[in-house]
Amino acid sequence: MGKELSGLQIFKYLPAAKKQNEANCKKCGCMTCMAFALKLAKNQIAAEKCEYVPDELKIIIADALKTKQHEYRIGTENSVKTGGETVMFRHDKTFVNRTVIAVTLESKDRDFDKKLKRIKDFQIERIGETFKIDAICLKDTGNFNTAAKKIADEKIPLILDTENEIMPEILQANPLITGTDRYKDNLTCITADTLNGLESKSSEKIKNGYEKIVLEITMKNKTIQEIIEALTYIRRMAVQEKLEPLTFPVMVRIPAYNTLAETTAAASLLICRYANIIVLEDFDEAMLTALFTLRQNIYTNPQKPLQVESKVYEINEPDRNSPVILTTNFALTYFAVANELESLPFGSYLVVTPSDGMSVLTAWSADKFTAEIAAKTVKKFQLDEKVNKKAIIIPGLLSHMKEELQNALQGWEIIVGTIEACEIPEFIKSLNYKQQSCSK
């Protein structure tokens, strides 16, 4: 049940495949039955558009269109999405919404305001993206609504862990609620120690009209391996079998282990293996930096490489005596080179060519980095008017292109640079460029 349907599989049920008189009648608005089947497979047209679709196919299509995993938002202005996954493995298609990383805060903590500010102010930047804590899980230890309002006022998404009444104003902040199921219209968390218990509770809530559900599988008396196995089972039953009680995002609270390394390892495994939301007991900047980095890698679409805009980047306020460096628009390459150039005591121009987000050698082998493309980019941004010394440093991996680039860029000196980005500063200094003051 719940299998994907291809256009060809649908076509087999239509008049053209069965060689019936109604074949390719165009009544559905498509030129052929095959065209209709292809649109139907992509959910671009309704089955009802064809009056000859058999009931058997309608049942199969209805099953195929069932939701694999529901998608919800937590919060309002700075909301985060959770759920919405459609595959078991990112290389099949891509993962959709990054694992929500939340930290726990007790409502009556004597250092509540200080900790809240620390959480709010923490952020890191990596490959052009800025990451912050996605949500705060507020644990009710007293003075709950006052503490919740402070967090809501900071526009930080809330996970509310309480059995007590929640103020309407806080409910309007669209929190995820765990600990009570009295707020049927809000996103509600169902908790259980076993898979059978979780499925049973979820089925009951669905029957009672709950539409916004998050599942929580607890780590009580379980090893991390057992949790991973449970998460894998839930994702498989949701994505492949579309078992309704398990087609919801899954949350896991991670206890504080004996060492920070153990906690980080557990959280890393859960990010890689199907936890839609993880709640950390402790707030640690080093651990979060590692988790954000891992998550960014896992949730990058493998079919769309990270890339930056193709243009000339002016680093450290360059002037007419500054060096010119050439590279591709693959994000990792750009940031590796740019970070090294920022360490220089003078400015530089970094020319980034349009290469579909490919690295240097990949772009060259795919004809996305050619002498013509490089020359066109240099001329487009009028670099010859910005520098006195018309010399361009190219990646060491492209040393074989020196003569070709020299012919394409008449009047420019082509200098073969380093292979490793970390060697760029010393190499450029060896070229005796004038050192100028710059603001960093």
Image (cartoon, helix red, strand yellow):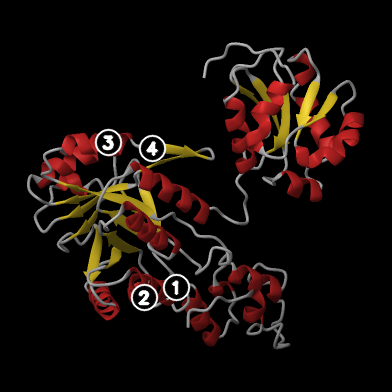
Tell me, for residue 244, which label it has, or none: 2
List the residue tagged with mark 1: 66
Residue 23, image x, y percentages: 71, 81
Q: CA distance from mark 1 to mark 2?
A: 9 Å
Which of marks 1 and 4 precedes in the sequence?
1
Q: Residues within 10 Å of mark 3 (few under 14, many from 20)?
A: few
Q: Which residue is mark 3?
A: 118
In terms of sequence position, does the residue under pointer 4 or pointer 3 come before the other?
3
Camera-side mark, 3 or 1: 3
Q: Residues within 10 Å of mark 1 (few under 14, many from 20)?
A: some
Disc 4 residue type (three-letter): Gln
Q: Is residue 358 left or right of residue 91?
A: right
Question: Which quarter of the figure has residue 124?
Answer: top left
What residue appears at the point 56 percent right and 85 percent down from the top-left corner?
Answer: 54
Disc 2 or 3, which lies upstream in sequence?
3
> What residue sits 9% from the left and 50% below the top?
141
Which residue is identified by label 4? 123
Determine whether the residue tagged by mark 4 lies in a helix, strand or loop: strand
